[in-house]
């Protein structure tokens, strides 16, 4: 059993109000690390606010970039609706850049379901009331029991990477622990927003691994589409 980090928040320490960063095609999972390059004024203000409080930000995907307030979750202020499930991450590293940017690393803590979107902050960033209850097991991601068909996974990954002329450190992948491997691949593989959201919403890492293999096999053994990824 792996011990929790001294810095990991307990369930009762999770924030009741969470700023969100809508970003299409980008996903954070519990136990994952996500680097971010922050430069828009509203998101710089959001990060500085989070640093002064609980240091947590919710990563969510827009339902469809350019959507309007009448579609799905939106606060009624003309903002693009976002998917109802995201992942809260804790700022574990940040640095200032002379040109006014902030470089961050978020550590995935727990998924959440949006119960309510709050009025837009005066600085322009969005926040929600998150529901964590159904995702409480995420906090114990270090000790999750996982079943992965590694031989099938690596074969599918090799075919997928060949089809996109990508390369990686295969020796390091072979040595990675199951949980770390699945989480990292789900986050870094160039899937479309719909596939990323499906991986995020998988009930557990074993289910996520099976879904990941299916997406890799579909992408690696099928002809590459000429247009943008399909949405479903």
Image (spheres, rainbow, N blue to C red):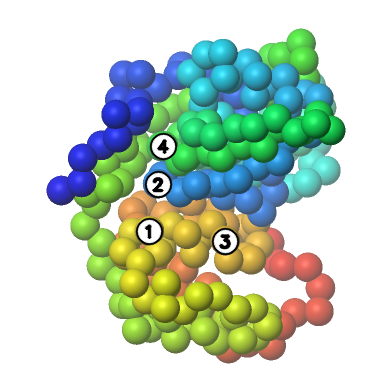
Closer-to-camera residue (95/224): 95
- Name the residue: 21% across, 40% down: 3
Q: CA distance from mark 2 to mark 3?
A: 14 Å
Residue 146: x and y in percent read: 26, 61
**Res. 42 visible in picture:** yes
Classify the position of the C terminus by image quarter: bottom right
Using the rendered image of the protein, determine whether residue 127 is visible from the camera's viewpoint: no
Identify the residue under disc 1: 180
Residue under numbered circle 2: 31
- Rounded to the nearest angstrom, the CA distance separating label 1 from label 3 is 12 Å
Q: Helix, strand or loop at disc 1?
A: helix
| Element type at mark 3 | helix
Is 21 placed above or below 221 here?
Answer: above
The residue tagged 3 is: 188
Contact between marks 2 and 1 (CB within 8 A): the answer is: yes
Q: Which residue is mark 4?
A: 109
N-terminal-most mark, 2 or 1 = 2
As drawn, the label of residue 14 is none
Q: Considering the numbered disc 2 on the image, is that residue within a helix, a strand or a loop?
A: loop
- Specify the quadrant of the image occupied by residue 124: top right
- How many other residues sit within 10 Å of disc 1, few (<14), some (14-19) or many (≥20)? some
Which element type, helix, strand or loop, lies under badge 4? strand
Residue at the far top in the pictured view: 122
Tag 4 or tag 2, which sits nearer the N-term? 2
- Give the answer, above or below, for where 70 lies relative to 226: above
Marked residue nearer the N-terminal end (1 or 4): 4
């Amino acid at each position: 059993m792996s011990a929790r980090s001294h810095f990991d928040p307990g369930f009762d320490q999770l924030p009741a109000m969470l700023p969100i960063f809508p970003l299409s095609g980008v996903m954070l999972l519990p136990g994952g690390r996500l680097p971010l390059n922050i430069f828009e004024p509203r998101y710089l203000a959001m990060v500085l606010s989070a640093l002064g409080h609980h240091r947590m930000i919710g990563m969510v995907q827009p339902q469809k970039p350019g959507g309007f307030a009448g579609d799905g979750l939106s606060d009624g202020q003309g903002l693009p609706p976002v998917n109802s499930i995201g992942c809260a991450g804790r700022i574990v590293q940040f640095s200032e850049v002379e040109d006014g940017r902030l470089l961050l690393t978020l550590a995935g803590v727990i998924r959440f379901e949006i119960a309510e979107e709050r009025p837009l902050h005066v600085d322009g960033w969005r926040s929600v009331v998150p529901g964590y209850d159904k995702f409480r097991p995420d906090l114990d991601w270090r000790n999750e029991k996982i079943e992965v068909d590694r031989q099938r996974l690596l074969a599918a990954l090799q075919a997928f990477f060949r089809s996109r002329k990508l390369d990686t450190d295969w020796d390091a992948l072979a040595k990675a622990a199951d949980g770390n491997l699945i989480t990292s691949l789900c986050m870094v593989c160039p899937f479309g927003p719909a596939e990323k959201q499906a991986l995020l919403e998988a009930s557990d890492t074993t289910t996520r691994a099976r879904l990941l293999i299916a997406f890799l096999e579909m992408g690696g053994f099928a002809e590459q589409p000429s247009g943008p990824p399909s949405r479903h």
